[in-house]
Image (tube, rainbow, N blue to C red):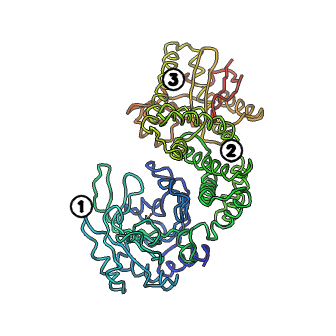
Amino acid sequence: MNSKELKKKYIEFFKKKGHVEIKTSSLIPENDPTVLFTTAGMHPLVPFLLGQPHPAGRRLVSVQKCLRTGDIDDVGDATHNTFFEMLGNWSLGDYWKKETIEWCYEFLIKELKINPNKLHVSVFAGDELIPKDSESAEIWISLGIPKERIHFLPREDNWWGPAGETGPCGPDTEMFIDTGKEKCSPNCKPGCNCGKYFEVWNAVFMEYNKTKGGNFEPLKQKNVDTGMGVERTTAVLNNCKSVYETDLFKPIIDKIKELSKKEDTKAERIIADHLRAATFVLAEKIVPSNIERGYILRRLIRRAIRFGRILEMEKGFTKEIVEVVIDNYKDEYPELEKNKDFIFEELEKEEERFMKTLEAGLKVFNKLAKEGDISGEKAFLLFQSYGFPLEMTVELAKERELKVDVDGFHKAYKKHQEISRVGAEKEFKGGLADSSYETTKLHTATHLLAEALRRVLKRDIVQKGSNITPERLRFDFNFDRKLTDEEIKKIEDLVNEKIKEGLPVIKKEMTLEEAKKIGAQGVFEGKYGEKVFVYFINDFSKEICGGPHVKNTKELGEFKIVKQKSIAAGVRRIKAIVK
Ligand code: SER
């Protein structure tokens, strides 16, 4: 049974049990600022697990695209992936343990034809906070699973969630297939990572909500949340030794082998996993950068490139592999084909950017490595000047049995941010002290420019720096190539249009929360106090700022961009005037 058949069977089975199929949500969580990516099928359902009625009803089923980077170092073994697809079914305050476990059993044995004698399950052993889940164990026994194949495990194994810091969670029961391999030790049991017991399914009994204070309070309704990994289940159904032998990965691995001059299973797997994940992230229009999602994407691409070099692949190999990924998935995920040009363009740029500094960076790394363990400052130098993600430095160091001072790296990073912030504040103070009419005008022009960049370049443009003198404005922002003459003209035209329209500039005081909620622009992290000012330029722009600004855009005169240049990887600078 290939992966497509498995997905179809799953959806059909639960539809027959009264479930409604819901479409996969984006990899970017819509309402959860506590995580960067969607990590499970339940993630987009959080509001409904908390009690809001779902428009499709109380029984839902889906295939959800997910990304988890917590296990990134394990990628390369038989089963760990960053990106994966998860099958899931949910009861939103509807059925409970009996139906859940009975259907799991029926699906595994009758539909997937798994030998019932090979099935092991685990249930929550209980602790000082939550009692042992004897009810689930009894249900498994009633289905004929003997006691010795029911394992009571602690919280580390049999408790799920929440996905972020807060939210729905609860004890779970997990299902494993005994692969027939020797036990790695007399204590080997489900939950052990040696590969003897292969986890295929997890059913979570979500009765609790974890609050900000770390307490577990009962949820309004008792929910069921199950998750089955498509990759692993396809592997176990087809007696594959790893997920890379399944139809989900086979064509990708074949392509990698074709492009390699050397053989190295682990490297091949890492490249396949990371480029598949990067393709899906790029399809969400995320671009590689040094923060948040962009940083994860950068790590995935750069790690794939580094392993590609180990296999002696030629420059541009990422694109050829991604082409196969897109082909393999485009029927189920049309966003891949739709954003193909964007994906290739970004990939090529990131490969070029990385290649430019990689050689030099490796030389520096080798030199530093000769001096012993890598200090935080050194790791930061590699990050700042050679684009080495911290994790890559750690990995390279590990290969040489050296340590990296990770805390020291974060300190150096913070210090650097602090210096640029103090710099920015000084500049800002300078602006305030010199609140001449000319600088005030340029302040407002800066807001117009930032918004015009967003609209013309159609990207999530954020300010990386700003400096204003009475003569000109200077604005730094995240963008990775030269703007074309046509783009410059469009931006100038749009700003000038807004100046001509004579839009009122209005200041409102609100809490940072409110400002975030209404989507005001601003560098949020740790920069502002509780209360902030948001400047509205009619409905064209809203931005957190201390001011000062003009009262109406018509005061500005004609706006003109006089210079543009790159000041760091992925950061551009524009200088502009109004006259
Ligand atoms: N949320 C659970 C998991 O991720 C079940 O879907 O395993």
Q: Is residue 81 above or below residue 13?
A: above
Q: Which mark is nearer the camera, 1 or 3?
A: 1
Q: Locate residue 135: give its quadrant.
A: bottom left
> Which residue is located at x 55 percent, y 23 percent?
551
Marks 1/3: CA distance? Answer: 49 Å
Q: SS class of the residue under badge 2?
A: helix
**Residue beneath label 2, please?**
351
Image disc number at residue 424 = 3
Badge 3 amino acid: Ala
Q: SS class of the residue under badge 3?
A: helix
Residue 496: % across, % down: 69, 28
**Residue beneath label 1, please?**
129
Badge 2 amino acid: Glu
Q: Locate residue 567: give its quadrant.
A: top right
In terms of depth relative to the viewer, which is nearer, 247 or 493?
Answer: 247
Mark 2 / mark 3, whichever is N-terminal: 2
Q: Please state if 308 lies on the left or on the right of 411 as rendered.
A: right
In terms of depth relative to the viewer, which is nearer, 33 or 454?
Answer: 33
Q: Locate residue 415: give its quadrant.
A: top left
Q: Which mark is nearer the camera, 2 or 3?
A: 2
Mark 1 / mark 2, whichever is N-terminal: 1
Q: Please state if 169 lies on the left or on the right of 262 as rendered.
A: left
Residue sticking out furthest to the left = 128
Taking the image in four quarters, ligand 1 sits in the one at bottom left
